[in-house]
Image (spheres, rainbow, N blue to C red):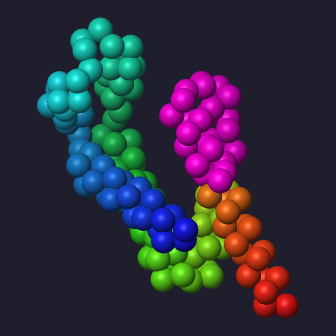
Amino acid sequence: MLRGIAIFKFTKAVLLLGFGVVVHTDVAGLMGEWVPRIGFGPGSHFLGRLVVEATALTPNRIRDVGAGSLIYAALFLTEGIGLWLLKKWAEWMTIVITSSALPVEIWEFVRHPHWGKAVLLVVNLALVGYLIYMVRKQRHHEV
Protein backbone atom coordinates (compact mmCIF):
# COMPACT_ATOMS: atom_id res chain seq x y z
CA MET A 1 0.00 0.00 0.00
CA LEU A 2 2.87 2.40 0.75
CA ARG A 3 4.18 1.97 -2.77
CA GLY A 4 0.71 2.80 -4.10
CA ILE A 5 0.79 6.03 -2.10
CA ALA A 6 4.30 6.64 -3.46
CA ILE A 7 2.99 6.31 -7.03
CA PHE A 8 0.21 8.79 -6.17
CA LYS A 9 2.86 11.23 -4.85
CA PHE A 10 5.04 10.69 -7.96
CA THR A 11 2.05 11.44 -10.19
CA LYS A 12 1.31 14.67 -8.33
CA ALA A 13 5.00 15.63 -8.53
CA VAL A 14 5.12 15.05 -12.30
CA LEU A 15 1.96 17.10 -12.86
CA LEU A 16 3.27 19.96 -10.73
CA LEU A 17 6.69 19.82 -12.39
CA GLY A 18 5.01 20.02 -15.78
CA PHE A 19 2.87 22.92 -14.67
CA GLY A 20 5.83 24.71 -13.07
CA VAL A 21 7.87 24.41 -16.26
CA VAL A 22 5.03 25.29 -18.66
CA VAL A 23 3.56 28.27 -16.81
CA HIS A 24 4.70 31.54 -18.31
CA THR A 25 3.45 35.06 -18.88
CA ASP A 26 1.49 34.31 -22.07
CA VAL A 27 -1.47 32.85 -20.22
CA ALA A 28 -3.95 33.98 -22.87
CA GLY A 29 -1.95 32.29 -25.63
CA LEU A 30 -1.58 29.13 -23.58
CA MET A 31 -5.32 29.04 -22.90
CA GLY A 32 -6.12 29.70 -26.57
CA GLU A 33 -4.01 26.69 -27.47
CA TRP A 34 -5.24 24.25 -24.80
CA VAL A 35 -8.93 25.08 -24.30
CA PRO A 36 -10.01 23.66 -27.69
CA ARG A 37 -7.94 20.51 -27.04
CA ILE A 38 -9.62 19.94 -23.67
CA GLY A 39 -13.03 20.28 -25.29
CA PHE A 40 -14.69 23.09 -23.35
CA GLY A 41 -17.36 24.89 -25.34
CA PRO A 42 -17.31 28.68 -25.69
CA GLY A 43 -20.31 29.02 -23.33
CA SER A 44 -18.81 26.86 -20.57
CA HIS A 45 -19.17 28.33 -17.07
CA PHE A 46 -15.84 26.74 -16.10
CA LEU A 47 -14.12 28.27 -19.12
CA GLY A 48 -15.51 31.73 -18.35
CA ARG A 49 -14.29 31.53 -14.77
CA LEU A 50 -10.89 30.25 -15.92
CA VAL A 51 -10.49 33.11 -18.39
CA VAL A 52 -11.39 35.71 -15.74
CA GLU A 53 -8.91 34.20 -13.26
CA ALA A 54 -6.15 33.81 -15.85
CA THR A 55 -6.38 37.36 -17.19
CA ALA A 56 -6.11 38.75 -13.64
CA LEU A 57 -2.69 37.11 -13.16
CA THR A 58 0.27 39.46 -13.20
CA PRO A 59 3.69 38.29 -14.44
CA ASN A 60 4.99 38.28 -10.85
CA ARG A 61 2.02 36.20 -9.68
CA ILE A 62 2.54 33.73 -12.54
CA ARG A 63 6.20 33.42 -11.57
CA ASP A 64 5.23 32.84 -7.94
CA VAL A 65 2.68 30.18 -8.89
CA GLY A 66 5.27 28.44 -11.07
CA ALA A 67 7.87 28.52 -8.30
CA GLY A 68 5.33 27.27 -5.75
CA SER A 69 4.37 24.36 -7.97
CA LEU A 70 8.05 23.41 -8.32
CA ILE A 71 8.49 23.52 -4.53
CA TYR A 72 5.43 21.32 -4.00
CA ALA A 73 6.67 18.97 -6.72
CA ALA A 74 9.96 18.61 -4.83
CA LEU A 75 8.07 17.82 -1.61
CA PHE A 76 5.86 15.23 -3.33
CA LEU A 77 8.91 13.70 -5.02
CA THR A 78 10.70 13.46 -1.66
CA GLU A 79 7.64 11.85 -0.07
CA GLY A 80 7.27 9.45 -2.99
CA ILE A 81 10.90 8.34 -2.94
CA GLY A 82 10.84 7.85 0.83
CA LEU A 83 7.58 5.89 0.71
CA TRP A 84 8.84 3.78 -2.19
CA LEU A 85 11.92 2.91 -0.13
CA LEU A 86 9.63 2.17 2.86
CA LYS A 87 11.30 4.77 5.08
CA LYS A 88 9.62 5.64 8.36
CA TRP A 89 10.54 9.33 8.04
CA ALA A 90 8.57 9.44 4.78
CA GLU A 91 5.47 8.11 6.53
CA TRP A 92 5.75 10.86 9.14
CA MET A 93 6.51 13.49 6.51
CA THR A 94 3.45 12.46 4.50
CA ILE A 95 1.25 12.50 7.60
CA VAL A 96 2.40 16.01 8.54
CA ILE A 97 2.27 17.54 5.05
CA THR A 98 -1.04 15.97 4.06
CA SER A 99 -2.65 16.74 7.44
CA SER A 100 -1.53 20.36 7.22
CA ALA A 101 -3.46 20.77 3.97
CA LEU A 102 -6.70 19.23 5.29
CA PRO A 103 -8.10 22.39 6.97
CA VAL A 104 -7.70 24.32 3.70
CA GLU A 105 -9.29 21.49 1.71
CA ILE A 106 -12.21 21.32 4.15
CA TRP A 107 -12.67 25.10 4.04
CA GLU A 108 -12.60 25.13 0.23
CA PHE A 109 -15.10 22.27 0.05
CA VAL A 110 -17.47 23.99 2.50
CA ARG A 111 -17.22 27.31 0.62
CA HIS A 112 -17.59 25.83 -2.87
CA PRO A 113 -18.72 22.19 -2.81
CA HIS A 114 -17.65 20.19 -5.85
CA TRP A 115 -17.34 16.46 -6.41
CA GLY A 116 -13.63 16.83 -7.32
CA LYS A 117 -12.90 18.55 -4.03
CA ALA A 118 -14.87 15.87 -2.18
CA VAL A 119 -12.85 13.09 -3.83
CA LEU A 120 -9.55 14.82 -3.04
CA LEU A 121 -10.61 15.36 0.57
CA VAL A 122 -11.69 11.74 1.02
CA VAL A 123 -8.49 10.41 -0.57
CA ASN A 124 -6.29 12.61 1.64
CA LEU A 125 -8.26 11.71 4.79
CA ALA A 126 -7.96 8.01 3.94
CA LEU A 127 -4.25 8.40 3.22
CA VAL A 128 -3.56 10.13 6.55
CA GLY A 129 -5.73 7.64 8.43
CA TYR A 130 -3.96 4.68 6.86
CA LEU A 131 -0.49 6.08 7.56
CA ILE A 132 -1.35 6.86 11.19
CA TYR A 133 -2.70 3.31 11.54
CA MET A 134 0.52 1.88 10.04
CA VAL A 135 2.80 4.00 12.25
CA ARG A 136 0.86 3.02 15.38
CA LYS A 137 0.83 -0.64 14.34
CA GLN A 138 4.62 -0.61 13.76
CA ARG A 139 5.17 1.16 17.07
CA HIS A 140 3.05 -1.46 18.86
CA HIS A 141 5.13 -4.28 17.32
CA GLU A 142 8.39 -2.58 18.38
CA VAL A 143 7.33 -2.31 22.05
Q: Residue furthest top?
A: 43
Q: Quadrant of the N terminus?
A: bottom right
Horizontal side of residue 70 vs 137, given as left or right: left
Q: Is residue 113 magenta?
A: yes
The answer to whether residue 15 is above or below residue 76 is above
Residue at 47% in and 77% down = 84
Q: Which image quarter: residue 141?
A: bottom right
Q: Nearer the viewer, residue 29 or 90?
A: 90
Rendering quarter of residue 36: top left
Q: Quadrant of residue 94?
A: bottom right
Indicate the position of residue 71 as horizontal and vertical percent values. 43, 62
At a point 72% along the width and 75% down the height, the residue shown is 135
| Residue at figure coordinates x 62%, y 73% from the top left | 91
The answer to whether residue 54 is left or right of residue 87 is left
- Taking the image as shown, residue 8 lies to the left or right of residue 47, namely right
Depth check: 88 or 17 in front? 88
Q: Which residues are magenta?
A: 101-126
Farthest residue, direction bottom: 143
Residue 29 visible to the viewer:
no
Viewer-closest of 20 and 79: 79
Residue 59 vertical position relative to residue 130 in the rendered view, above or below = above
Tell which of 59 and 16 is nearer to you.
16
Where is residue 127 drawn, in percent x and y?
62, 58
Query: Does residue 110 show up?
Result: yes
Quarter of the image with the C terminus is bottom right
Q: Is residue 123 magenta?
A: yes
Height in image: 43 above or below 56?
A: above
**Percent position of residue 136, x then y:** 78, 75
Magenta span: chief secondary structure:
helix
Count the numbered circles shown: 0
User: Could you say where residue 52 lies in the image, as x and y percent from the top left?
Assistant: 36, 20
